[in-house]
Image (cartoon, helix red, strand yellow):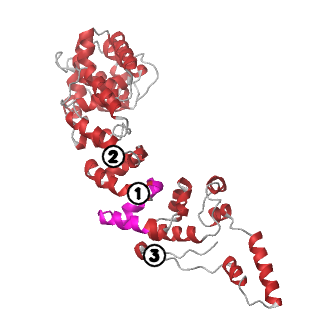
């Protein structure tokens, strides 16, 4: 392994020349021209030509890549004739605080990083990013997420724009992990027009940042596609500027009109909804368009057949569809049903209310008050939450298919 000179001040980093067998051979080629020295120099130069820089071996022994990674990376580094530039890059990365494993990951992701000039490219980029207020550890994390973009001058202007938009460097980094195009997309022609349009629709920077994680390409896609997304969100009954609009945009992003129409028809059939009822349900909970058909079928079977809720009732309270069937809807139905059948709870007490409240409130209102009349109620409820149907309460397991969260 060739020694790497680690420097912890990358701004003024100038890699110390490492004396290698190769450099000795080069010097041997310029020895005084006596017969003996000429013969020795010729032999040394011949040996040098016969022993070129072994890139693949260097990647394994010095950069700690696996043989498979090294083989792949070496194909874009075959032009390297000496380890001097890669050595300097490794020392620079080490100076940022990156571990050997981090450096190996960065090199495997972007082998051309080893071809960078430290003084002309990496050190100036580091200085610019620190001038933005980024700490060395934040810069190191940026290198790991996208080393190729770190090397480019445009990364500075993009961070200047994105950090305020996303609220923090950490939020931005989370979004970049989902969408590497954030650091490569054209700010002026793509990103800024998209952000401006979304803000016209009533979304603020926080909304856009939140959407950019589950919908990574939202602000980096073609502006015309973003306008089409907004039109589809409005078409499902959620106007711009409303609190539900962000959720509607999340639901329909990158879904075609045909797929949305097909899902709406499925909802009508599954929940026995009329045209107006499905419109009400989707406008209140647009994210149901992203629920799987199997989950929706099982919800309908349980709520309509087992609990006995009317389709219209569900359409006006679609939040029921957001809860876990096995861990919330079923166990609480068992408790409410048991209490009503045994005269411990008023018949008009709403199942929807029992479902909506937090776990602590549910225990206080539906379990603890009945510990004397039903001593095993708490234990049976806990068993039901684990997916077990307690026989002591006389519950019957609904036929809703295999369990799924």
Task: Quote the CA–CA distance across marks 3 and 2.
Answer: 32 Å
Name the mark nearer the viewer: 3 or 2: 2
Which labelled disc corresponds to residue 187? 2
The reply to whether discs 1 and 3 touch (Cβ–Cβ < 8 Å) is no
Q: Residue 181, how many percent across, how many down?
A: 41, 44
Name the mark nearer the viewer: 1 or 3: 3
- Looking at the rendering, the stretch of residues picked out in magenta corresponds to 123-148
Which labelled disc corresponds to residue 13? 3
| Disc 2 crowd, CA 10 A, few/some/many (<14, 14-19, 20+) | some
Q: Is residue 327 magenta?
A: no
Instruction: Give the quadrant of residue 53.
Output: bottom right
> Left or right of 57: which side holds 334?
left
> Left or right of 348: which side holds 265?
right
> Taking 236 as reference, is 246 above or below it?
below
Residue drawn at x 47%, y 55% is 148
> 82 or 312, which is in the foreground?
82
């Amino acid at each position: 392994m060739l020694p790497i000179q680690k420097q912890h001040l990358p701004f003024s980093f100038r890699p110390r020349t490492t004396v290698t067998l190769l450099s000795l051979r080069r010097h041997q080629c310029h020895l005084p021209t006596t017969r003996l020295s000429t013969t020795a120099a010729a032999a040394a130069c011949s040996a040098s030509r016969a022993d070129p820089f072994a890139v693949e071996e260097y990647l394994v022994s010095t950069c700690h890549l696996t043989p498979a990674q090294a083989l792949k990376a070496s194909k874009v580094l075959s032009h390297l004739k000496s380890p001097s530039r890669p050595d300097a890059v490794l020392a620079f990365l080490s100076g940022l605080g990156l571990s050997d494993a981090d450096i190996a990951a960065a090199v495997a992701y972007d082998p051309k990083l080893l071809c960078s000039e430290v003084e002309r490219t990496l050190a100036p980029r580091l200085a610019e990013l620190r001038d933005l207020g980024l700490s060395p550890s934040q810069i190191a994390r940026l290198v790991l997420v996208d080393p190729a973009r770190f090397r480019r001058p445009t990364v500075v202007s993009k961070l200047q724009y994105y950090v305020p938009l996303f609220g923090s460097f950490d939020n931005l980094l989370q979004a970049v992990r989902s969408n590497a195009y954030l650091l490569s997309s054209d700010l002026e022609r793509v990103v800024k027009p998209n952000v401006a349009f979304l803000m016209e629709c009533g979304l603020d920077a926080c909304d856009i940042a939140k959407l950019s994680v589950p919908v990574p390409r939202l602000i980096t896609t073609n502006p015309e596609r973003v306008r089409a997304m907004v039109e589809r969100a409005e078409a499902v009954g959620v106007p711009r500027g409303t609190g539900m609009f962000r959720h509607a945009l999340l639901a329909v992003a990158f879904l075609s009109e045909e797929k949305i129409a097909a899902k709406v028809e499925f909802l009508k059939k599954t929940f026995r909804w009329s045209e107006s009822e499905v419109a009400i349900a989707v406008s209140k909970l647009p994210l149901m368009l992203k629920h799987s058909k199997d989950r929706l079928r099982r919800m309908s079977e349980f709520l309509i057949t087992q609990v006995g809720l009317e389709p219209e009732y569900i359409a006006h309270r679609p939040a029921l569809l957001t809860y876990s069937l096995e861990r919330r809807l079923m166990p609480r139905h068992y408790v409410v049903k048991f209490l009503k059948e045994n005269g411990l709870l008023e018949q008009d007490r709403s199942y929807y209310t029992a479902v909506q409240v937090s776990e602590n409130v549910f225990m206080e209102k539906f379990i603890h008050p009945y510990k004397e009349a039903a001593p095993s109620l708490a234990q049976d409820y806990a068993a039901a939450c684990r997916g077990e149907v307690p026989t002591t309460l006389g519950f019957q397991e609904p036929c809703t298919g295999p369990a799924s969260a």
